[in-house]
Image: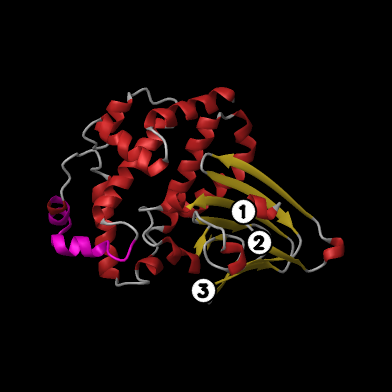
Amino acid sequence: MVSATYFPLDLRFRRPDTFSGQLARWQLGQVSLSRLTADALLYRRTARHLANEREEQYLVTVPSLSDVAFLQCERDIRCPPGGFLIERGHEPYEFSHGEANDLWVLKVPGEALLGRLRMPERYCSLTFNADSGAGGLFADLLRLMPNRLPAMSASERSQIGGQLVDLLILAVAGDERVLTSNGSSVRAGHLARVEHYVRGRLGERNLRPEDIAGACGISVRYLHDLFQGSDLSLGEWIRNQRLLACREALGNAGDRRTIAEIAYDWGFGDQAQLSRQFKARFGMTPRDYRNRQLQGAARD
């Protein structure tokens, strides 16, 4: 059950003969929420488990009863109740709690974070506040979800899942410990300004590197350099942000805009351009994606 809900793991029980645990799971579009209440456990993900993995996945875990320990890439952290941590599925790790625990876990595909959190693996060596601010609101909403979900359609649940990811990013993206790790704080600050500027102007079809660099007070060469070492160039990242915005609009049953209007509003030259790039990115046309989402909502 644990492997099916998260991904393949080995489990080691402190008291196998008397172990007790319960696992519940809810699907929220491309993300899933689960609640795992269990006696002491050690979860181990090894290189053997990664052999057939293709898509990057992250787990965001909020412990409620006792501390959890997490070891990944030689970074050993402990997260008490009142905090949360992020686990990367594409690297071996150990996760354990020595006492009974109540864990709320959000499973997030890597593509949901692509371009929104620069190098998401940096966030896996830290614990974050789940008692106040955006992190507190994020944890509160996880616990409220199960009682509200039965009355929601598939489309509404998908939108809620996207909003939980938005709130997660808000809670962790500005953490100074992350900004100053794996690079200088000056470089990280420039990158944050660039991403903020671009996200506010994705609908501008003629968004040029020269405009971005000038608005952020850097050279065009340095602008492109900021994106080196990541999976996407500046142009690829902008295109991906537009595609994600269009996919969100197409999956919203309450959005009455035509596909052409959505394409235009998010910076594409026309519907044909969006269709080509959307199919290349997501494996189906915008029309097919919208129809599939509407059919899922109708079944609910």
Residue type marked 3: Cys
Nearest the eye: 168 or 29: 29
Q: Does dot 2 land on a helix, a strand or a loop?
A: loop
Instruction: Determine whether label 1 and label 3 are within 8 Å by CB.
Output: no
* Residue pictured at 46% horizontal, 52% vertical: 168
Badge 2 crowding class, 10 Å Cα cut-off, few under 14, some 14 to 19, many 20 or more, is many
Question: According to the image, label 1 marks what residue?
Answer: 6
Instruction: Determine whether label 1 and label 2 are within 8 Å by CB.
Output: yes
Colour mapping used in the image: secondary structure
Residue type marked 2: Leu
Q: Does dot 3 land on a helix, a strand or a loop?
A: loop
Q: Position of residue 34 (x, y in %)?
A: 63, 48
**Mark 2 vs mark 3, CA separation in Å:** 17 Å
Q: Does dot 1 land on a helix, a strand or a loop?
A: loop
Instruction: Give the mark nearest the N terminus, 1 or 3.
Output: 1
Instruction: Determine whether label 2 and label 3 are within 8 Å by CB.
Output: no
* Horizontal side, residue 46 vs residue 118: left or right: right
**Is residue 143 in sight in this rendering?**
yes
**Mark 1 vs mark 3, CA separation in Å:** 20 Å
Q: Quadrant of residue 21?
A: bottom right
Question: According to the image, label 3 marks what residue?
Answer: 73
Nearest the eye: 240 or 155: 240
Residue type marked 1: Tyr
Q: Any magenta on residue 116?
A: no
Badge 1 crowding class, 10 Å Cα cut-off, few under 14, some 14 to 19, many 20 or more, is some
Question: According to the image, label 2 marks what residue?
Answer: 9
**Mark 1 vs mark 2, CA separation in Å:** 8 Å
| Segment tinted magenta in the rendering | 211-230
Q: Quadrant of residue 97?
A: bottom right
Q: Quadrant of residue 228?
A: bottom left
* Residue pictured at 54% horizontal, 35% vertical: 157
Q: Position of residue 291 (x, y in %)?
A: 45, 26
